[in-house]
Amino acid sequence: MRRVLHLLGLAAGLFVLWLFAVWPPPSWYRTHWPRQTAFMAARPDTSPASRSGRLYRPVPLDSIAPAMAEGVMIGEDQKFLTHHGIDYLAMAQALGYRRPDFSWDDPRDRAALYAVLPNAWSRRDKLRGASTITQQLAKNLYLSPSRNPLRKVKEAVTAWRLEHALGKRRIMELYLNIVELGDGVWGAEAASQLYFKRAARSLTRDQAAALAGTLPFPRRSNPGYRPGRMRWRQSLILRRMRGEQVEVPKAEEPPDTPDETPTGADSLAPTEVLDSLTPAPEPEQPPSPIPGESSP
């Protein structure tokens, strides 16, 4: 027993050490763009989208149409503005929890949660739909596509650190610039230039919803490849943008559908959904890529 406790203590110590060894630390991203993310490094530069391989052009949030952030929040994380990095209720519901809310003070809520915890491994794929934008940013910046339980713990802890170091506006800015939107296509600016031949600041609502609709399966369906699946989600996102109360599934892969483009969306003005966010501190100089071996 003493040896077991010793090993557990060693494992806990190594995990804490890893938390402080995450490099670059979250605060580094207040004023810098990643030269490449962990997800980019895991993808071979063999994209047919460009002769040079990876397409990645980070731009400030003000250079991306507000409809893009709105569409991503509708499709990926509707509680982005209110949670603190992790949506605990969504995670519990992904495991089968059926109550509409949760409180540790309510014994019925606790009993319902404990009843579904044994389902964690069998329903691990459902947890993808419970990931917040902050968790997805943490995963993209630092981790791998692996779905093992330890990686999910790292993702949750890193998401909490990103929330405290960066704030909502910078998290959204980074996410929109590093999220994968096609094979070898990273970020809203690169995707907008490739698919629509225009800057991300000029995206129409229909086009922004199309890019948001490529998530969470950007390599299986995007505006340049099998667009029927993308348009299924695009249509739902556009309906939510117009105020309709429809559900936009997050982790469910959409069915094959005819390539029919929703109509009437381009005439709608984008909503300034990020006006309520507290701006991140302005950097003393424009963000720059992370040098290869330099430290913050």
Image (cartoon, rainbow, N blue to C red):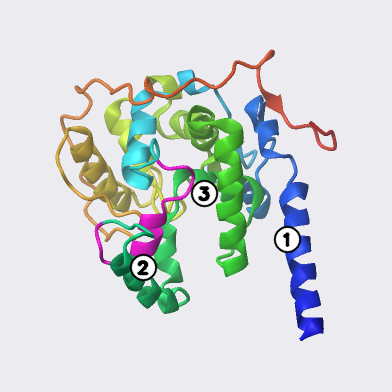
Please identify, in this view, whether the residue under mark 2 or under mark 3 is nearer the observer. 2
Mark 3 packing: few (<14 Cα in 10 Å), some, or many (20+)? many
Q: Position of residue 98 (x, y in %)?
A: 26, 66
Tell me: 75 left or right of 144.
left
Location of residue 24 (image quadrant): top right
Q: Secondary structure at mark 1?
A: helix
Residue lying farthest right? 293
What residue is pinned by disc 3? 135
Question: Type of residue at label 3?
Answer: Gln
Residue placed most toward the observer, 96 or 266? 96
Can residue 5 be seen in this snapshot? yes
Question: Type of residue at label 2?
Answer: Arg
Q: Residue at x 76, y 86 (%)?
A: 1
Q: Secondary structure at mark 2?
A: helix
What residue is pinned by disc 1? 15
Residue placed most toward the observer, 227 or 48? 227
Q: Residue at x 69, y 13 (%)?
A: 284
Please identify, in this view, whether the residue under mark 1 or under mark 3 is nearer the observer. 1
Location of residue 67 (image quadrant): top left
Location of residue 287 (image quadrant): top right
Question: Is 267 situated above or below 183?
Answer: above
Q: For the C terminus, which image quadrant?
A: top right
The span picked out in magenta is 83-100
The question of residue 92 being in magenta is answered with: yes
Q: Which mark is residue 110?
A: 2
CA distance for labels 2 and 3: 24 Å
Mark 2 packing: few (<14 Cα in 10 Å), some, or many (20+)? few
Question: Is 165 situated above or below 234?
Answer: above
Tell me: 159 left or right of 206.
right
